Structure formats: C-alpha cells, structure tokens
Image (cartoon, grey):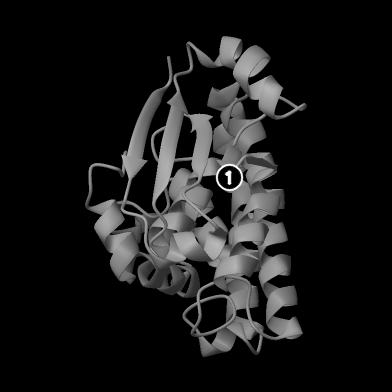
Amino acid sequence: MPSTKQCGTAGPANKTIGGVPAIHYLDFASRGRGQVVRLMWEDAGVAYEDIRYSFDEYPEAKKTVIAEKNPTATVPVIELNGKILTQSYAILRHFGRQMKYDGETEEEKYWADAMCDIAIDWRTLFIAAFLSPNKEETYPKHKETDRKHFLNALETHLNSHNLSQKGPFVIGKNITYADLVIYQLLHDEGLTQEERKGLQEYPRLKQMVDAVEARPNVKAFLESDRYLG
C-alpha cells in the first residue's frame, strides 16, 4: 500500500485552486518532476495529500490504480474535486495560472515558459544519463557536456534578458513556476547542496537558488520532516 500523508492546513490558497489536492507520485525522496508540484504548493501555502508509491510497489500500481486514473500510466497524477490532472508541466502551468506563478504581462509569461522549456530539455538528458544501465559512464559524461551546456545557457539568459536582469528570479522580483522547475533540476543534479559548491561558476543561478530557499514557506519546508533530501 502506498504511504499517505496530510500536509498543511487548508487555507486561502486551497480556496483559490478549489480544494485540497492529492498527488500520486513515486517515493523518490524530495526529487523529480512531481516534487516541483509539491514545492509550488508548499510555497503558496496549499494543503495537500501526499500519496507515495515505493519502487517495489509501483510496477503493480502503474498497471492498476495509476492506469485507471491516467491512460499513459505515468505520474504525477493529481486528484482534485473528482477531477484528474496529469502531465507534470501542464499541472504546474495550470496551478501557476490560478495562483499567479506565471507572470503578469505576456512578455513575462513567455519568458517563464521559455526558461522552463530549457530546463525540460536538460532534465530529459539528465534522466537518460542518470538512469542508464551504463550510468558509471553516461552520467560523468553528462556532467561534463550537456549539463555544462545548459548551465551556461541558463546563466547567460539570466544575466542578459531584460526581465531576468531585475532579479533574483526569472522574470525579476516575482517568482514563477519556471524558477521552481529550474531550482528542482539543480537540486536533483546535486548542485544546490554543499553550500552551492556546484554553482560557484554560475553566480546568477546561485542567486536564484538562494532566493527560492529564502522564501518563508520554502525555508520552513526544507527544515521540516516533509523534506526528504
């Protein structure tokens, strides 16, 4: 049976999105695409039900309970008021629109989407290398090639785009879902830990990471038993 935990107390943010959502996801510590959804909820003060499947039980759950909710049999799956939401980035954009995590102007919305899409491309290559049967060869190569390429690209964009120059976030002073997507990817690549050792050559990315973790609700989450590393 999956583990289930109630996180937070329902408040104004739950009213904004229409209730208390439940997330079905792997018990993968505080990592992965599904964790970005949790992170947005934590930052916004959304109470939610966290349903986690161990790696041993997930293959069976994938064929049954997950497939019943999502024809592609993939997670995360969100349940809210009898509705099913799937596809992690569509989920983020949906809640982002509801809770104003997508920017205000069309230029801000575009730039948040563009930066998110860069991170999506990076994560695809990261997962392929990290989960490869030949990880001992593919992941070190990834760190020296694709990872450096995307770090440099994001750092350049953050330093040069007129919105990002207003910092510390992608569109300036206001956080968006794109900041959380990039933050989570940096976290999963092991670059936010050890006093940002892996980001010393990327000060603008480091500034963004610091700003995300300094947000009161994110800080409280990272210091709580809900954060699993």
Q: Is residue 131 left or right of residue 202?
A: right
Query: Splitting the image into 4 quarters, where does residue 158 fall?
Result: bottom right
Residue at (57%, 64%) from the top-left corner?
A: 177
Closest to the observer, 58 or 139 = 58
Residue at (55%, 60%) from the top-left corner?
A: 17
Q: Where residue 182 sits: x, y (%)?
A: 55, 59
Query: Splitting the image into 4 quarters, where does residue 110 fall?
Result: bottom right
- Badge 1 marks a residue whose secondary structure is loop
Q: Where residue 90 sits: x, y (%)?
A: 70, 52
Q: Is residue 39 left or right of residue 18?
A: left
Closest to the observer, 5 or 200 = 5
Is residue 133 something that shows in the picture?
no
Is residue 137 something that shows in the picture?
yes
Vertical placement of residue 113 versus 65, above or below:
below
Q: Where residue 161 sits: x, y (%)?
A: 66, 84
Closest to the observer, 215 or 188 = 215
Residue at (42%, 40%) from the top-left corner?
A: 49
- Quadrant holding the N terminus: top left
Q: Residues within 10 Å of mark 1 (few under 14, many from 20)?
A: few
Q: Where residue 214 sits: x, y (%)?
A: 31, 70
- Quadrant holding the C terminus: top left
Q: Which residue is mark 1?
A: 81
Closest to the observer, 61 or 21 = 21
Residue at (55%, 57%) from the top-left corner?
A: 18
Q: Amino acid at mark 1?
A: Asn
How many discs appear? 1
